[in-house]
Amino acid sequence: MNRAFIPILSLFLLFALSACGQEHNSSSAKEEAQQTSEKSDAQTKQIEITDASGNTLTFDQAPTSIATFDSGVLNILQELDANIIGRPTASGPVDEELKDITEIGNPHQPNFELIAKVNPEVLVVPLSFKQYEDNLIEQGIKPVYTKANSVEDIQETIHTFGVLLNKEKEADKINQTITDKINKTKSNDTHATKTLLVYGAPGTYLAALPNSLSGDLLEIAGGENIAADFPKEEKYPQYASISPEKIVEKNPQQIMLITHGDPEAVKKAFQEEMNKNATWKNLDAVRNGQVIVLPSHLFGSNPGVKVAEALQTMQESLAEAK
């Protein structure tokens, strides 16, 4: 090789390498700028959700504090690691991790003084709480409405709070787990167990209809709701008044009792109620000892992410009547 050519070749390679280096640095700088821009967009992008009332709510960022009257929503918020500063007033033992959270009452007896004291950015409420909406907004508290009349409602609530808290992936994972468990336990039995779902407390009993959560679970579990054609209560459209005549006519194979309070006390009171009317004694459910109290933590209120566990429990109960 011509020795005079060597310096020229070396100089050419030097320029080439320098150009490559500049191109690489330029590419890295662009990637870094793009990532910074994406992070900035994520931080400034508003969060938008539509709640169970149809309200569209916008937030500049994920709420830093939340309170709720609903034990099922409380369960969902715990799973999504929200900052919960107000919870439903408990009638029984409370988990250790919840003891330091302020009790704010329940939808029927809200403690507005304590709600104002904890001053959550968001208060999760049922649709029946609409009457207090203006009062909350005046305090700078945003009400978010939820409902839990079906498995679909509960999964929609999980999705909504996943969006609200910037934890959609976590919410999707929870919902997928629920769906998988339900698909696994879903009944294909064509011989549905005729069932009466009774919701109430001593002295007050209502039949749960198919448009209630327990009614939805009963259908998925493979039961037949004998109260499906009972007229709805005006104030409680998911329930109907109990008609002994119609119940005797339908003759349920199983009666499931649902309550907030002491299960055994409710069962005893209900049996006393049945004893007052001799016709109840001839029901298949009564003659075969198929009057069952469902666990209050799964059926007395919204079970939240434990809804698949509630379904399994109901299915096991139905199996006892076959």
Image (tube, grey):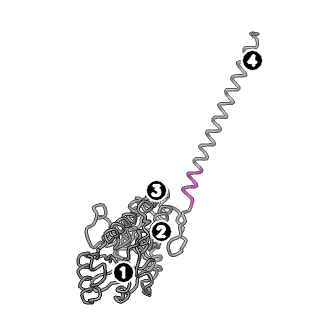
Q: Earlier in the sequence, mark 2 or mark 4?
A: 4
Circle 2: residue type: Glu
Q: Are marks 2 and 1 in contact (CB under 8 Å)?
A: no
Which marked residue is nearer to the observer: mark 1 or mark 4?
1
Counting every numbered tag in the picture gives 4
Q: Residue at x 64, y 34 (%)?
A: 24
Circle 3: residue type: Lys
Which marked residue is nearer to the observer: mark 4 or mark 3?
3
Q: Earlier in the sequence, mark 1 or mark 4?
A: 4
How far is the residue under mark 1 from the one under mark 3? 33 Å
How far is the residue under mark 2 from the one under mark 4? 74 Å
The secondary structure type at the circle numbered 3 is: helix
Q: Residues within 10 Å of mark 3 (few under 14, many from 20)?
A: few
How far is the residue under mark 3 from the one under mark 2? 15 Å
Q: Position of residue 319 (x, y in %)?
A: 34, 68
How far is the residue under mark 2 from the one under mark 1? 25 Å
Residue holding disc 2 = 152
Residue holding disc 3 = 173
Residue 16 horizontal side relative to residue 281, left or right: right
| Image position of 277 with respect to 181: above or below | below
Residue stretch in magenta: 37-45
Residue holding disc 4 = 8
Q: Residue at x 46, y 80 (%)?
A: 130
Q: Position of residue 93 (x, y in %)?
A: 25, 68
Q: Earlier in the sequence, mark 1 or mark 3?
A: 1
Please state which of residues 285 and 103 is positioned toward the viewer in this rendering. Answer: 285
User: Magenta stretch containing residue 170, yes or no?
Assistant: no
| Image quadrant occupied by the C terminus | bottom left
Residue holding disc 1 = 108
Circle 4: residue type: Ile
| Image position of 29 with respect to 161: above or below | above
